[in-house]
Image: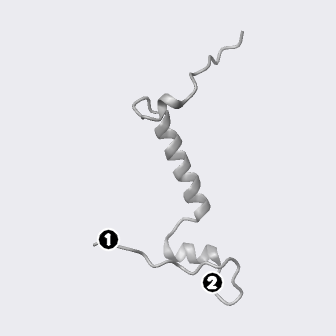
Amino acid sequence: MAYRMAPLPMPLNDPDGMPYSSMLFYANLNSLASRRVDLSRVFFCDIMDPASCLHTLLFPSRSTQLP
């Protein structure tokens, strides 16, 4: 059976409730923006691995030396 977390109510700047950043802190979660950055970084680092099936889709490396 798969474990599911109940979604947190996260209205931004809710005047009656806890601020978004506080809810994330107390729930020990990262913000959606930081998760997106982390996942993008991992994805692109994985693509750079020559063993990756997507590595063949990249442009060939250019020389970094000046003429």
Q: Residue furthest top?
A: 67
What residue lies at 53% left-to-right and 79% top-to-bottom?
8
Q: Amino acid at mark 1?
A: Ala
Q: How is the image coloured?
A: one colour
| Mark linked to residue 22 | none
- SS at circle 1: loop
> Does dot 2 land on a helix, a strand or a loop?
loop
Density class for disc 1 (Cα within 10 Å; few <14, some 14-19, many ≥20) is few
> Residue 41: horizontal and vertical position, in percent?
54, 46
- Residue 9: image quadrant is bottom right
Identify whether 55 is placed above or below 23.
Answer: above
Determine crowd level at label 2: few under 14, some 14-19, many 20+ residues with C-alpha closer than 10 A. some
- Asked if 30 appears above or below 13 in the picture, the reply is above
Residue 54 percent location from the top left of the image: 47, 35
Tell me the CA gap for discs 1 and 2.
29 Å
Measured as percent of width and height from the top left, residue 29 is found at: 51, 69
Looking at marks 1 and 2 on the same chain, the residue that comes earlier in the sequence is marked by 1
Q: Which residue is mark 1?
A: 2
Q: Is residue 7 left or right of residue 15?
A: left
Q: Residue lying farthest bottom? A: 16
Marks 1 and 2: which is nearer the front? 1
> In the displayed structure, would residue 6 be above or below residue 57?
below
Front-most of 5 and 64? 5
Extreme residue in the front direction: 57
Identity of the amino acid at label 2?
Met
Which quarter of the image is occupied by the N terminus? bottom left
Q: In this view of the protein, which residue sits in the foreground, 67 or 62?
A: 62
- The C terminus appears in which quarter of the rendering? top right
Q: Position of residue 65 (x, y in %)?
A: 66, 14
Q: Which residue does the numbered mark 2 point to in the structure image?
A: 18
Residue drawn 53% across the image and 41% down it = 44
**Residue at position x 71%, y 87% from top?**
15
